[in-house]
């Protein structure tokens, strides 16, 4: 061979050290030197499995070079470094037959694909390698499931935000950020506005980069931050590490952030009453539409895609100021405080739901322990787990339905606290507070000749 290719591959290299492929290359070069072969190029696919079916860029490029006659042979450490897929092997056999290229391996001998015997040997090796990969995959999958059932982590990978590398202790500064983000999103802040704030404050992600809505959503939906173990998207047991937020909060976050109706591609709100203002003439929802001078206003729009009458307009700033004052007054009203307390005790039952949820989690843990001690088999574990898991899903659904109440936490009977923070809250957070109290805001028709803001046109429709 006067222009040979060395091909090296390793399936998994989480540390990105490339030591596995380096050893392969060293052995291949040593073999080539002894055989008098000239190595023209080394082709490397690091951390890429041949069994998974994922694209191997360097392998594809090597095959194209052989097809074009640029390379006249291949040297690999072992046949299974080249192929673990019978389909891919057959294509490679066709390529070698068409080009007369040589194939040699350091530990598997000559790989003569030009003869029927050589092709039979290659296919047998490929079948054995495929079986080994499938068996390994099965063992790993079963091990991951067993660890999940026992509330243990898999290990490896990137450090989880909020915890140390061993995932045994909370990193105080990061834990505080997790709690803050969870509370803000449950209270009505958008993912985008929370990310923008964290970036502005110079708070990095676990990898040191800026926050994105995808990264924050993944973090907040993760069961691990409430001390729970998740497997294939399902919470299966309590974890062996401390919780940063409560189980209740995780259930509500997962429900909120998994809602398909939730819009995730919008810009941060600039109209805190958007979606709440209705026209008093036709009843249509008024939309945010600024005037030519840039002044914000709510408009009953008509025309394509709109069903309004087009006759009602209201400047945003005075309306928002009036509604803010009404909300603050409402929060300090003793009658309202009593109504909220009654509603919380009769409608939500959050404490009891959370207690039931925790009890069922403990039952799952007990089942996992029994399975680990071989007191029950897999069929018995699966049969007993089914009804418990269904109760857990229902409890999470009921907790998720309580998401909106978080917007008022700490403010009922304490409007001074909200007044002091109001201007610093994002429009999305302001809207969440208003929406927790109001079903809608009806804007009546304007009186001809009256240009100033007229509070008598505004009718709040309270929920409680």
Image: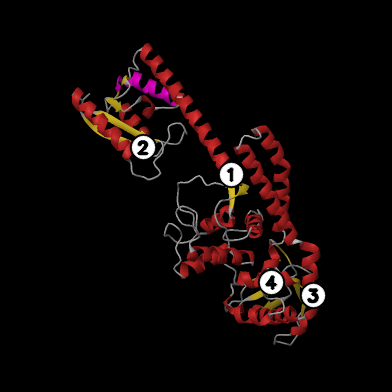
Q: Secondary structure at mark 3?
A: helix
Q: Is residue 91 magenta?
A: yes
Mark linked to residue 338: 3
Residue nearest the observer in this picture, 390 or 51: 390
Distance Cα–Cα, label 2 vs label 4: 54 Å
User: Residue 180: x, y in percent?
Assistant: 56, 67
Q: Secondary structure at mark 1?
A: loop
Distance Cα–Cα, label 4 vs label 1: 38 Å
- The picture quadrant where one finds residue 46 is top left
Mark linked to residue 408: 4
The answer to whether mark 2 and mark 4 are in CB contact below 8 A is: no
Return the residue at label 1: 150
Taking 62 as reference, is 303 above or below it? below
Q: Residues within 10 Å of mark 3 (few under 14, many from 20)?
A: few
Taking 219 as reference, is 438 above or below it? below
Give the number of the mark in front: 3 or 2.
3
Mark linked to residue 359: none
The answer to whether mark 3 and mark 4 are in CB contact below 8 A is: no
Q: Where the N terminus falls, by quadrant?
A: top left
User: Residue 296: x, y in percent?
Assistant: 61, 76
Tag 4 or tag 3, which sits nearer the N-term? Answer: 3
Q: Residue at x 59, y 63 (%)?
A: 182
Residue 58 visible within the image: yes
Q: Secondary structure at mark 4?
A: helix
Residue nearest the observer in this picture, 155 or 211: 155
Mark linked to residue 45: 2
Q: Residues within 10 Å of mark 4 (few under 14, many from 20)?
A: some
Q: Is residue 409 magenta?
A: no
């Amino acid at each position: 061979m006067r222009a040979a290719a060395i091909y090296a591959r390793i399936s998994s290299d989480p540390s990105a050290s490339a030591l596995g492929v380096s050893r392969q290359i060293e052995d291949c070069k040593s073999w080539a030197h002894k055989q008098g072969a000239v190595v023209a190029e080394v082709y490397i696919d690091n951390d890429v499995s041949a069994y998974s079916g994922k694209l191997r860029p360097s392998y594809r490029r090597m095959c194209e070079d052989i097809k074009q006659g640029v390379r006249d042979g291949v040297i690999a450490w072992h046949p299974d470094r080249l192929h673990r897929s019978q389909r891919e092997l057959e294509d490679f056999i066709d390529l070698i037959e068409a080009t007369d290229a040589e194939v040699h391996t350091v530990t598997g001998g000559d790989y003569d694909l030009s003869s029927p015997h050589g092709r039979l040997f290659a296919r047998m090796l490929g079948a054995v390698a495929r079986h080994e990969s499938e068996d390994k995959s099965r063992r790993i999958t079963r091990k991951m499931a067993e660890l999940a059932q026992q509330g243990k982590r898999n290990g490896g990978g990137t450090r989880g935000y909020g915890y140390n590398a061993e995932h045994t202790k909370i990193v105080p500064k990061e834990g505080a950020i997790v709690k803050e983000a969870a509370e803000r999103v449950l209270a009505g802040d958008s993912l985008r506005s929370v990310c923008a704030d964290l970036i502005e404050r110079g708070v990095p992600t676990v990898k040191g980069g800026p926050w994105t809505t995808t990264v924050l959503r993944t973090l907040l939906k993760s069961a691990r931050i409430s001390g729970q173990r998740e497997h294939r998207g399902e919470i299966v047991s309590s974890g062996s590490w401390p919780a940063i937020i409560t189980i209740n909060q995780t259930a509500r976050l997962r429900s909120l952030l998994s809602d398909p109706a939730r819009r995730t591609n919008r810009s941060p709100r600039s109209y805190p009453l958007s979606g709440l203002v209705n026209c008093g003439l036709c009843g249509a929802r008024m939309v945010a539409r600024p005037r030519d001078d840039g002044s914000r206003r709510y408009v009953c729009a008509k025309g394509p895609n709109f069903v309004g009458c087009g006759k009602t307009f209201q400047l945003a700033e005075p309306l928002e100021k009036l509604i803010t004052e009404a909300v603050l007054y409402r929060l300090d009203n003793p009658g309202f405080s009593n109504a909220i307390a009654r509603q919380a005790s009769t409608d939500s039952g959050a404490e009891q739901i959370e207690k039931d949820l925790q009890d069922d989690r403990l039952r799952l843990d007990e089942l996992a322990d029994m399975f680990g001690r071989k007191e029950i088999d897999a069929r018995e574990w699966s049969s007993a787990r089914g009804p418990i898991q269904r109760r857990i899903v229902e409890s999470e659904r009921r907790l998720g339905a309580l998401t909106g109440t978080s917007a008022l936490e700490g403010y009922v009977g304490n409007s001074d606290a909200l007044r002091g923070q109001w201007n610093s809250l994002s429009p999305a957070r302001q809207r969440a507070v208003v929406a927790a109290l109001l079903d809608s805001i009806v804007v009546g028709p304007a009186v001809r000749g009256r240009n100033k803001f007229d509070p008598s046109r505004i009718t709040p429709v309270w929920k409680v």
